[in-house]
Protein backbone atom coordinates (compact mmCIF):
# COMPACT_ATOMS: atom_id res chain seq x y z
CA UNK A 1 0.00 0.00 0.00
CA UNK A 2 1.34 3.43 -0.91
CA UNK A 3 2.22 5.62 2.05
CA UNK A 4 1.54 9.32 2.26
CA UNK A 5 4.04 11.71 3.85
CA UNK A 6 2.99 15.22 4.94
CA UNK A 7 5.38 18.05 5.80
CA UNK A 8 3.91 20.85 7.99
CA UNK A 9 4.58 24.37 6.73
CA UNK A 10 5.32 25.54 10.28
CA UNK A 11 8.62 23.64 10.50
CA UNK A 12 11.62 25.69 11.61
CA UNK A 13 13.16 24.99 8.19
CA UNK A 14 11.50 24.36 4.86
CA UNK A 15 11.83 20.76 3.72
CA UNK A 16 12.15 19.54 0.13
CA UNK A 17 12.08 16.17 -1.55
CA UNK A 18 14.76 17.03 -4.12
CA UNK A 19 18.34 16.20 -3.24
CA UNK A 20 19.78 19.72 -3.56
CA UNK A 21 17.26 22.46 -2.73
CA UNK A 22 17.75 25.70 -4.61
CA UNK A 23 18.47 28.68 -2.30
CA UNK A 24 16.09 31.61 -2.31
CA UNK A 25 17.36 34.21 -4.76
CA UNK A 26 15.85 37.36 -6.28
CA UNK A 27 17.77 39.59 -8.70
CA UNK A 28 21.04 37.95 -7.70
CA UNK A 29 20.48 38.54 -3.97
CA UNK A 30 20.50 35.25 -2.05
CA UNK A 31 18.87 34.85 1.32
CA UNK A 32 20.09 32.17 3.72
CA UNK A 33 18.37 31.26 6.99
CA UNK A 34 20.40 32.03 10.11
CA UNK A 35 20.67 30.45 13.55
CA UNK A 36 22.95 30.79 16.55
CA UNK A 37 24.75 27.64 17.64
CA UNK A 38 22.61 27.61 20.81
CA UNK A 39 19.35 27.33 18.82
CA UNK A 40 17.52 24.04 18.30
CA UNK A 41 15.37 24.16 15.14
CA UNK A 42 12.57 21.58 15.13
CA UNK A 43 10.96 19.62 12.32
CA UNK A 44 7.90 17.37 12.13
CA UNK A 45 7.00 14.85 9.46
CA UNK A 46 3.71 12.95 9.37
CA UNK A 47 3.19 9.64 7.60
CA UNK A 48 0.14 7.45 7.18
CA UNK A 49 0.18 4.48 9.54
CA UNK A 50 -0.77 1.95 6.87
CA UNK A 51 2.26 2.88 4.76
CA UNK A 52 4.70 1.31 7.26
CA UNK A 53 7.17 4.22 7.22
CA UNK A 54 10.22 3.91 9.46
CA UNK A 55 13.15 6.14 10.36
CA UNK A 56 16.28 5.40 8.36
CA UNK A 57 18.62 8.30 9.15
CA UNK A 58 18.58 11.99 10.08
CA UNK A 59 21.85 13.90 9.89
CA UNK A 60 23.35 17.37 9.56
CA UNK A 61 25.54 17.77 6.47
CA UNK A 62 28.06 20.55 5.83
CA UNK A 63 28.35 22.57 2.61
CA UNK A 64 30.54 19.86 1.07
CA UNK A 65 28.07 17.09 1.84
CA UNK A 66 30.15 15.76 4.72
CA UNK A 67 28.55 14.18 7.77
CA UNK A 68 28.51 16.42 10.86
CA UNK A 69 26.25 14.74 13.43
CA UNK A 70 22.96 12.92 13.87
CA UNK A 71 19.68 14.76 14.45
CA UNK A 72 17.82 13.19 17.40
CA UNK A 73 14.23 12.15 16.74
CA UNK A 74 11.16 10.72 18.43
CA UNK A 75 8.53 8.54 16.80
CA UNK A 76 4.94 8.13 17.89
CA UNK A 77 2.19 5.92 16.52
CA UNK A 78 -1.40 7.19 16.63
CA UNK A 79 -3.97 4.53 15.81
CA UNK A 80 -6.88 6.95 16.26
CA UNK A 81 -5.61 9.28 13.51
CA UNK A 82 -3.69 6.54 11.63
CA UNK A 83 -0.49 8.57 11.73
CA UNK A 84 3.18 8.00 12.41
CA UNK A 85 4.63 11.23 13.85
CA UNK A 86 8.35 11.96 13.54
CA UNK A 87 9.72 14.90 15.56
CA UNK A 88 13.29 16.08 14.99
CA UNK A 89 15.28 18.66 16.98
CA UNK A 90 18.70 19.61 15.66
CA UNK A 91 21.57 20.34 18.05
CA UNK A 92 23.74 23.10 16.52
CA UNK A 93 26.08 23.43 19.50
CA UNK A 94 29.55 24.69 18.52
CA UNK A 95 28.79 24.60 14.79
CA UNK A 96 29.71 27.46 12.48
CA UNK A 97 29.15 27.68 8.75
CA UNK A 98 26.66 26.45 6.14
CA UNK A 99 24.62 23.31 6.76
CA UNK A 100 21.49 21.44 5.83
CA UNK A 101 19.56 18.55 7.37
CA UNK A 102 18.94 15.33 5.47
CA UNK A 103 16.23 12.95 6.68
CA UNK A 104 15.72 9.52 5.16
CA UNK A 105 12.60 7.48 5.80
CA UNK A 106 12.20 3.87 4.70
CA UNK A 107 8.87 2.89 3.17
CA UNK A 108 8.01 -0.79 3.21
CA UNK A 109 5.40 -0.10 0.55
CA UNK A 110 8.03 -0.75 -2.08
CA UNK A 111 9.35 2.77 -2.66
CA UNK A 112 12.45 2.19 -0.57
CA UNK A 113 14.25 5.12 1.03
CA UNK A 114 12.67 8.57 0.71
CA UNK A 115 15.09 11.49 1.15
CA UNK A 116 13.85 14.80 2.57
CA UNK A 117 16.30 17.71 2.67
CA UNK A 118 16.08 21.04 4.46
CA UNK A 119 16.91 24.42 3.00
CA UNK A 120 20.45 25.65 3.59
CA UNK A 121 21.07 27.53 6.83
CA UNK A 122 24.02 29.36 8.34
CA UNK A 123 25.05 28.82 11.96
CA UNK A 124 26.79 31.68 13.81
CA UNK A 125 28.87 31.37 16.98
CA UNK A 126 28.38 35.04 17.88
CA UNK A 127 25.20 37.08 17.81
CA UNK A 128 26.70 39.72 15.53
CA UNK A 129 23.57 40.56 13.53
CA UNK A 130 20.42 42.30 14.82
CA UNK A 131 17.87 39.53 15.24
CA UNK A 132 15.20 38.01 17.41
CA UNK A 133 14.41 34.41 18.35
CA UNK A 134 10.76 33.43 17.93
CA UNK A 135 9.42 30.27 19.58
CA UNK A 136 5.93 29.01 18.81
CA UNK A 137 3.77 26.27 20.32
CA UNK A 138 0.06 25.58 20.54
CA UNK A 139 -2.25 24.12 23.17
CA UNK A 140 -4.08 21.96 20.66
CA UNK A 141 -3.33 20.28 17.36
CA UNK A 142 -3.77 22.45 14.30
CA UNK A 143 -1.99 24.31 11.50
CA UNK A 144 -1.05 20.91 10.10
CA UNK A 145 0.98 20.08 13.23
CA UNK A 146 0.51 17.50 16.00
CA UNK A 147 1.40 19.80 18.91
CA UNK A 148 0.47 17.44 21.74
CA UNK A 149 3.76 15.61 21.11
CA UNK A 150 5.42 18.55 22.90
CA UNK A 151 7.03 20.04 19.80
CA UNK A 152 7.72 23.75 19.49
CA UNK A 153 9.28 25.61 16.58
CA UNK A 154 12.06 28.20 16.61
CA UNK A 155 12.81 30.92 14.07
CA UNK A 156 15.75 33.30 14.24
CA UNK A 157 15.15 36.24 11.95
CA UNK A 158 16.48 39.74 11.37
CA UNK A 159 14.44 42.47 13.05
CA UNK A 160 13.27 43.46 16.52
CA UNK A 161 11.67 46.29 18.43
CA UNK A 162 13.19 49.45 17.06
CA UNK A 163 13.33 52.87 18.78
CA UNK A 164 10.00 54.69 18.92
CA UNK A 165 8.15 51.40 18.41
CA UNK A 166 6.17 51.83 21.66
CA UNK A 167 2.64 53.19 21.81
CA UNK A 168 0.29 53.14 24.79
CA UNK A 169 -3.38 52.31 25.18
CA UNK A 170 -5.85 51.44 27.90
CA UNK A 171 -8.98 49.41 28.44
CA UNK A 172 -11.46 51.82 30.07
CA UNK A 173 -14.83 51.51 31.72
CA UNK A 174 -16.66 54.81 32.28
CA UNK A 175 -20.07 55.85 33.63
CA UNK A 176 -22.17 58.65 32.15
CA UNK A 177 -24.92 60.13 34.34
CA UNK A 178 -28.05 62.06 33.34
CA UNK A 179 -26.11 65.33 33.22
CA UNK A 180 -23.64 63.69 30.83
CA UNK A 181 -20.92 63.86 33.44
CA UNK A 182 -18.36 61.12 32.98
CA UNK A 183 -16.81 59.13 35.80
CA UNK A 184 -14.07 56.65 35.04
CA UNK A 185 -14.83 53.46 36.93
CA UNK A 186 -11.90 51.35 35.85
CA UNK A 187 -8.90 51.63 33.56
CA UNK A 188 -6.09 49.21 32.73
CA UNK A 189 -3.20 50.65 30.72
CA UNK A 190 -1.10 48.49 28.43
CA UNK A 191 1.80 48.92 26.05
CA UNK A 192 1.72 48.17 22.33
CA UNK A 193 4.91 47.52 20.39
CA UNK A 194 5.60 47.62 16.68
CA UNK A 195 7.60 44.53 15.82
CA UNK A 196 9.81 44.59 12.72
CA UNK A 197 10.52 41.34 10.89
CA UNK A 198 13.23 41.41 8.24
CA UNK A 199 15.35 44.39 9.25
CA UNK A 200 16.55 46.74 6.51
CA UNK A 201 17.09 44.09 3.86
CA UNK A 202 13.86 42.15 4.20
CA UNK A 203 13.13 38.42 4.05
CA UNK A 204 11.68 36.03 1.45
CA UNK A 205 7.93 35.44 1.20
CA UNK A 206 8.35 31.83 2.30
CA UNK A 207 9.84 32.85 5.64
CA UNK A 208 7.21 35.46 6.48
CA UNK A 209 4.58 32.84 5.65
CA UNK A 210 6.14 30.56 8.27
CA UNK A 211 6.31 33.37 10.85
CA UNK A 212 2.70 34.34 10.15
CA UNK A 213 1.72 30.75 10.96
CA UNK A 214 3.82 30.92 14.12
CA UNK A 215 1.89 34.00 15.27
CA UNK A 216 -1.34 32.03 14.84
CA UNK A 217 -0.22 29.81 17.73
CA UNK A 218 -1.49 30.53 21.25
CA UNK A 219 2.04 30.67 22.69
CA UNK A 220 4.59 32.93 20.97
CA UNK A 221 7.84 33.92 22.68
CA UNK A 222 10.13 36.64 21.37
CA UNK A 223 13.54 36.35 23.03
CA UNK A 224 11.83 34.28 25.77
CA UNK A 225 9.11 36.89 26.53
CA UNK A 226 5.56 35.90 25.62
CA UNK A 227 3.77 38.26 23.22
CA UNK A 228 0.42 38.25 21.46
CA UNK A 229 -0.87 40.06 18.40
CA UNK A 230 -3.15 42.95 19.22
CA UNK A 231 -6.77 42.43 18.19
CA UNK A 232 -7.08 42.59 14.42
CA UNK A 233 -3.33 43.06 13.88
CA UNK A 234 -1.86 41.75 10.62
CA UNK A 235 1.59 41.76 9.08
CA UNK A 236 2.07 44.84 6.91
CA UNK A 237 4.70 44.88 4.17
CA UNK A 238 7.45 47.50 4.25
CA UNK A 239 9.42 47.93 1.04
CA UNK A 240 13.18 47.70 1.54
CA UNK A 241 15.04 50.32 -0.45
CA UNK A 242 17.77 48.87 -2.70
CA UNK A 243 16.83 45.30 -1.72
CA UNK A 244 14.41 42.94 -3.49
CA UNK A 245 12.90 41.47 -0.32
CA UNK A 246 10.36 43.14 1.94
CA UNK A 247 10.34 43.75 5.69
CA UNK A 248 7.16 43.32 7.72
CA UNK A 249 5.64 45.03 10.74
CA UNK A 250 2.94 43.98 13.19
CA UNK A 251 1.57 45.33 16.48
CA UNK A 252 2.07 43.09 19.51
CA UNK A 253 1.62 43.35 23.25
CA UNK A 254 3.05 41.38 26.14
CA UNK A 255 0.75 38.49 27.02
CA UNK A 256 1.05 39.30 30.72
CA UNK A 257 0.20 42.95 31.26
CA UNK A 258 2.66 44.28 33.83
CA UNK A 259 0.77 47.60 33.90
CA UNK A 260 -2.31 46.03 35.51
CA UNK A 261 -3.44 47.00 39.03
CA UNK A 262 -0.42 46.20 41.16
CA UNK A 263 -2.66 44.91 43.97
CA UNK A 264 -3.53 41.98 41.69
CA UNK A 265 0.02 40.71 42.16
CA UNK A 266 -0.24 40.42 45.93
CA UNK A 267 0.96 43.89 46.95
CA UNK A 268 -1.22 46.05 49.21
CA UNK A 269 -1.29 49.84 49.06
CA UNK A 270 -0.85 51.68 52.33
CA UNK A 271 -2.94 54.80 51.81
CA UNK A 272 -1.52 56.35 55.06
CA UNK A 273 2.03 56.30 53.67
CA UNK A 274 2.09 59.94 52.53
CA UNK A 275 0.41 61.20 55.71
CA UNK A 276 2.84 59.28 57.90
CA UNK A 277 5.98 60.66 56.27
CA UNK A 278 4.82 64.25 55.58
Image (spheres, grey):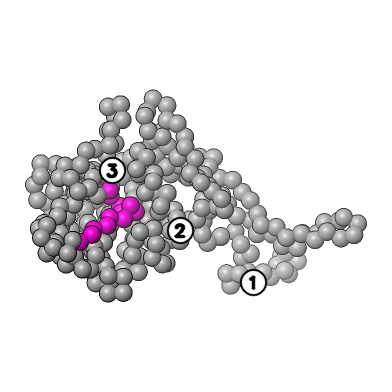
Disc 2 to disc 1, C-alpha distance = 27 Å
- Decide if residue 211 is in sight here: yes
Q: Is residue 256 above or below residue 95?
A: below
Disc 2 to disc 3, C-alpha distance = 23 Å
Give the side of residue 189 with respect to residue 116, left or right.
right
**Mark sitting on residue 33:** 3
Residue 172: % across, % down: 70, 57
**Mark sitting on residue 268:** 1
Answer whether labels 2 and 3 touch (C-beta < 8 Å): no
Disc 3 to disc 1, C-alpha distance = 49 Å
Magenta stretch: helix, strand or loop mostly: loop
Asked if residue 4 lies in the magenta stretch, the reply is: yes
Answer whether labels 2 and 1 touch (C-beta < 8 Å): no
Viewer-proximal residue among 79 and 14: 79
- What residue lies at 52% left-to-right and 61% top-to-bottom? 256
Reading the image, the residue beneath label 2 is: 226
Q: Is residue 257 above or below residue 168?
A: below
Mark 1 lies on a secondary structure that is loop
Q: Nearer the viewer, mark 3 or mark 1?
A: 3
- What residue lies at 18% left-to-right and 58% top-to-bottom? 71
Quarter that holds the C terminus: bottom right
- What residue lies at 39% left-to-right and 58% top-to-bottom? 143
Q: Residue furthest right?
A: 179
Q: Nearer the viewer, mark 2 or mark 3?
A: 3
Mark 2 lies on a secondary structure that is strand
- Magenta stretch bounds: 3-14
Amino acid sequence: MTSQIEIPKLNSLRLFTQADPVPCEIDGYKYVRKFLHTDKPALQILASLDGAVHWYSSVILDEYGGYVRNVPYTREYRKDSELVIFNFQADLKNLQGMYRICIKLFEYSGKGVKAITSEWFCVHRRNDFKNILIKAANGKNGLGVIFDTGIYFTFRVEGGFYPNSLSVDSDDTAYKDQDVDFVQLHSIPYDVYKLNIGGRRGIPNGLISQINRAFSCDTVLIDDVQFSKTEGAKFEAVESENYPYRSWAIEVTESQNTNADISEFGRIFDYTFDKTFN
